[in-house]
């Protein structure tokens, strides 16, 4: 598991390195006085480079994973100049949020229809130990697993409910529900890499080009049928209201044949796409 550590400040170590460096220069300049100055100069120069190697700068929203001959030592997430054991090997890992604009994938939905789908994912490293040691390359792992999650999501739900009328969730109308499902699956898939999913949204969704035209016609036909059904339902209500009003106010008495004729005429007028052309009857009602 990730272990946070706080190394000593690097400013004191930097000051010591500067002092050792100038002391080494002074020793080399006085070689003629004694041979000990040569040994002292070499020791001080080695100490200078040794101390400088242990200095590290950590910028905001960055971290360093420390390793000592194959053993995990800890992770430094604080910002500033620090000094650690110069024999430690370090791995830089960014803690900033990153966007992954996935490529548009061509997959089949739950009903087998070819569709195009793409997603935008916002992620960041939460556990540096897992990101450094549990996967070989955490950025490549994020890309591969994100693509797999989007493919699995597309195959789990239909594009719309034209074919699967009992579907409670569809990719086109799922909205936040579909995005939440995608976030949950991504979190499970990327947890081994210590990655946190902050947001995941479908950025592109459409039928594949080879069936887009046919599906558009089908959607238009379904919309026309639904509109016609609503018009007919309203027309039936209006005809019923007209017959009831005529009967209640005793305006005219109609037998079944005349009622049928009136219903037929009203339904044609109310359900027709174009405005009806009235014909004025100047004779009796029964002509």
Image (cartoon, grey):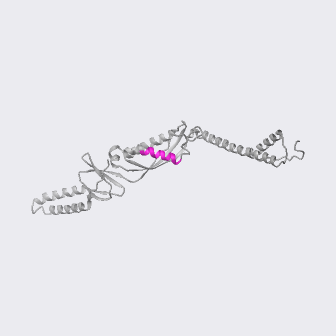
Where residue 96 appears, x then y in whole percent? 39, 54
Name of the residue lying farthest toward the right:
283
Q: Is residue 98 above or below residue 208?
A: below
User: Is residue 227 rendered magenta in the image?
Assistant: no
Where residue 260 appears, x then y in whole percent? 80, 40
Q: Which range of residues does the magenta coloring cover?
A: 175-187
Relative to residue 246, is residue 95 drawn left or right?
A: left
**Where on the picture, by quarter, is residue 235?**
top right
- Most common SS among magenta residues: helix
**Where on the picture, by quarter, is residue 84?**
bottom left
Give the number of callouts.
0
Q: Residue at x 30, y 57 (%)?
A: 57
**Where on the picture, by quarter, is residue 38?**
bottom left
Relative to residue 239, is residue 114 drawn left or right?
A: left
The front one of 207 and 76 is 76
Q: Residue at x 67, y 43 (%)?
A: 224
The front one of 224 and 3 is 3
Relative to residue 103, is residue 7 drawn left or right?
A: left
Where residue 237 appears, x then y in whole percent? 73, 45
Q: Residue at x 17, y 63 (%)?
A: 23
Q: Is residue 257 visible?
A: yes
The front one of 246 and 103 is 246
Name of the residue lying farthest toward the top:
112
User: Is residue 185 rendered magenta in the image?
Assistant: yes
Q: Is residue 102 visible?
A: no
Relative to residue 130, is residue 286 drawn left or right?
A: right
For the C terminus, give its image quadrant. Answer: top right
Where residue 158 appears, x then y in whole percent? 54, 40
């Amino acid at each position: 598991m990730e272990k946070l550590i706080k190394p000593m400040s690097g400013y004191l170590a930097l000051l010591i390195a500067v002092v050792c460096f100038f002391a080494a220069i002074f020793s080399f300049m006085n070689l003629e006085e004694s041979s000990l100055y040569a040994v002292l100069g070499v020791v001080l120069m080695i100490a200078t480079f040794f101390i400088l190697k242990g200095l590290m700068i950590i910028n905001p929203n960055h971290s360093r994973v420390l390793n000592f001959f194959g053993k995990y030592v800890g992770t430094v997430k604080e910002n500033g100049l620090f000094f650690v054991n110069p024999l430690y090997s370090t791995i830089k890992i960014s803690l900033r949020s990153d966007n992954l604009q996935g490529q548009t994938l061509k997959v089949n939905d739950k009903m087998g229809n070819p569709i195009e789908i793409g997603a935008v994912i916002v992620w960041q490293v939460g556990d540096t130990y897992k990101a450094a040691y549990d996967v070989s390359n955490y950025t490549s792992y994020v890309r591969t697993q994100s693509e797999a999650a989007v493919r699995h999501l597309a195959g789990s739900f239909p594009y719309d409910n034209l074919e699967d009328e009992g579907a409670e969730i569809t990719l086109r109308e799922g909205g936040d529900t579909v995005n939440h499902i995608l976030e949950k699956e991504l979190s499970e898939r990327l947890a081994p890499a210590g990655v946190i999913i902050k947001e995941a949204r479908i950025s592109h969704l459409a039928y594949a080009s080879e069936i887009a035209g046919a599906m558009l016609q089908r959607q238009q036909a379904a919309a026309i049928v639904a509109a016609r059904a609503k018009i007919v339902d309203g027309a039936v209500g209006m005809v019923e209201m007209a017959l009831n009003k005529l009967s209640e106010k005793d305006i005219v008495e109609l037998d079944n044949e005349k009622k049928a004729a009136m219903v037929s005429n009203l339904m044609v007028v109310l359900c027709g796409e174009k405005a009806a052309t009235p014909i004025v009857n100047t004779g009796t009602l029964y002509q």
